[in-house]
Amino acid sequence: MGVLNVTPDSFSDGGAWSDPRAAVRHALDLADQGADIIDIGGESTRPNAPPVPADEELARLVPVLRDLVPSLSVPVSVDTMKTSVAARCVDLGVSIVNDVNGLRDEGMPELCASTGVHTVIMHMNGLPRTMPAAMGGGFMEEIRGFLRERTAVALDAGIRPDRLVMDPGIGFGKDPAQNSEILENSSYFSDGYPVLSGSSRKRFLAVRYPGMDRDEASAEAARVAADSGADIVRVHNVALTRLRVS
């Protein structure tokens, strides 16, 4: 899964792809590098990031999606917490909703069910503006319990089991040691569903891989995730990750 941020304040590449034409070119380049999915996001979820109104998020996403979806041969995912944003993006041809808030916005499970999109349920400890620095003891069980509870909500809403993906939320309110444990045990969160792992360019990698540049560290982390049972790795540098993960 290749990352396309169209935000001015992303932690890793904020503002780099704010121009819709540049964003489309970058997404096509990611696909040429071997991305199987392009994941586009219009709201930063880094710690302390302010919330973005739905109309502003859509103003960033819609011009890109209008040109991008017809130009790609791979699926497009939208990284959003908002039902209204997801609905508009699905209308434009997005086939995956990547929800970092675990389908907790009103109507999101029903939208994903009625449209038949694939749906990523992610665990986030808190919210971006109030995200704690770490979870407590038993955090692995707590994350898995949350994913199971939200999966039950998704199934009750009518989302097909073969449309669900689990994401334990590396970097979202966990400390470096916790992030490493999650990375090394991806299959723990499966319960029979595919697992997505997203550690690319996150701060804990500097602790885990001191002296390694962020894309090399991200590619190595993607390899560890895949070896531990992740089915999808979400990355910024697709070409380098392809060399490391097979």
Image (cartoon, helix red, strand yellow):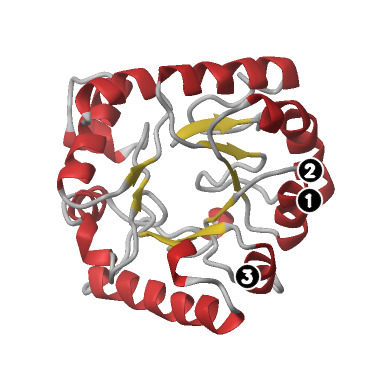
Q: Is 32 left, or right, of 44 in this rendering?
A: left
Q: Up-down: is 168 above or below 201?
A: below
**Residue to which mark 1 is pinned:** 88
Q: Up-down: is 55 above or below 72?
A: below
Question: Mark 2 packing: few (<14 Cα in 10 Å), some, or many (20+)?
Answer: many
**Residue to which mark 3 is pinned:** 113
Question: SS of the residue at dot 1?
Answer: helix
Question: SS of the residue at dot 3?
Answer: helix
Asked where in the image residue 103 lies, by quadrant, the reply is bottom right
Rounded to the nearest angstrom, the CA distance separating label 2 from label 1 is: 8 Å
Q: Give yes or no for contact between labels 2 and 1 (Cβ–Cβ under 8 Å).
A: yes
Q: List x then y, in percent, for residue 68.
A: 68, 28
Question: SS of the residue at dot 2?
Answer: helix
Tell me the residue at 68%/62% (across/down). Answer: 115
Asked where in the image residue 114 lies, by quadrant, the reply is bottom right
**Residue to which mark 2 is pinned:** 58
Tell me the residue at 66%/48% (across/down). Answer: 50
Earlier in the chain: of badge 3 and badge 2, it is 2
